[in-house]
Amino acid sequence: MKNKQIIILGVGNILLTDEGFGVHVVNRLKSQYRFPEKINLIDGNVSGLNLLETILDSDYLIIVDTIQNNGPPGTSYCLKGGDIPERMTPKNSLHQIDLFEVLALCRAVGHLPETVIYGVEPEDIETFNDQLSPKIFSRVGETVQKVLNELEQMGITYKEMGTKENVPGNPLENC
């Protein structure tokens, strides 16, 4: 993974309370850590089909989003490989394409990067509020750590802002 393009994509609408979870996680990563140039942190908001080119340009994709799976609010999920739904359903408009369908389009054109999705079951995705509910906010730090662990497993180094130390045992020369 040393020379591959890695995208960390936060998805969601930050104006609908917990719907913005993925964006909040990516914003925390951006504000607290420095990553090598090959790591691209993206606020994917609710871009849908507009994310297709970005995803096609990556070799490894880490997505953070809310996942509605009828579990208790705050339940953490991790989807990899065959766990990621494959679907393409009829649409009335290209504006109705969601993230899973963008991934299916990538698969259809022959380049679905290796993908992992970290998500939480939302508590409130209907109230207009740019702050996460307390239960979902409490999952941000845990999810940031999951993303960092994923990078460490690939041998990727990073630096926490305001410190001189890097991930133990890894040189910072790639930053």
Image (cartoon, grey):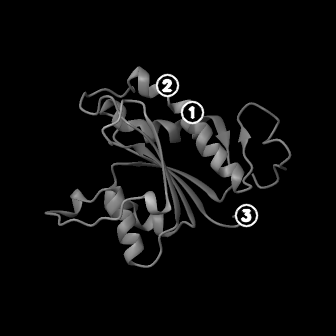
In the rendering, at what x and y percent does residue 158 appear?
72, 46
Q: Secondary structure beneath disc 1?
A: helix
Place of residue 49 in the rendered image (x, y in percent of width and height, measured from the top left): 32, 62
- Mark 3 lies on residue: 2
Q: Which residue does the image show at 68% across and 48% down from the upper left?
A: 35
Residue shown at 77% from the left, 55% from the top: 174
Q: Is residue 79 left or right of residue 172?
A: left
Which one is closest to the eye, mark 2 or mark 3? 2
Q: Nearer the viewer, mark 1 or mark 3?
A: 1
> Label 2, on which residue?
138
**What residue is shown at x 82% (from left), y 37% (from top)?**
165
Real-space Cα distance between discs 2 and 1? 8 Å
Tell me where residue 133 sits by quadrant: top left
Asked if labels 1 and 2 touch by Cβ distance under 8 angstroms, the answer is: yes
**Eyeballing the image, is 50 above or below 125?**
below
Residue identifier under label 1: 142
Residue 90, above or below 77: below
- Give above or below for 41 relative to 129: below
Q: Earlier in the sequence, mark 1 or mark 3?
A: 3
Give the residue type that dot 2 points to. Answer: Ser
Badges 1 and 3: C-beta atoms under 8 Å apart?
A: no
Say what secondary structure mark 3 lies in: loop
Which element type, helix, strand or loop, lies under badge 2? loop
Distance (Cα) linking label 2 and label 3: 32 Å
Looking at marks 2 and 3 on the same chain, the residue that comes earlier in the sequence is marked by 3
**Amino acid type of disc 1?**
Glu
The image quadrant of residue 105 is bottom left
Answer whether residue 164 is visible to the viewer in this image.
yes
The percent position of residue 128, horizontal first and vertical second, equals: 26, 28
Q: Is residue 14 visible?
A: no
Residue 75 or residue 14, whichever sits in front? 75
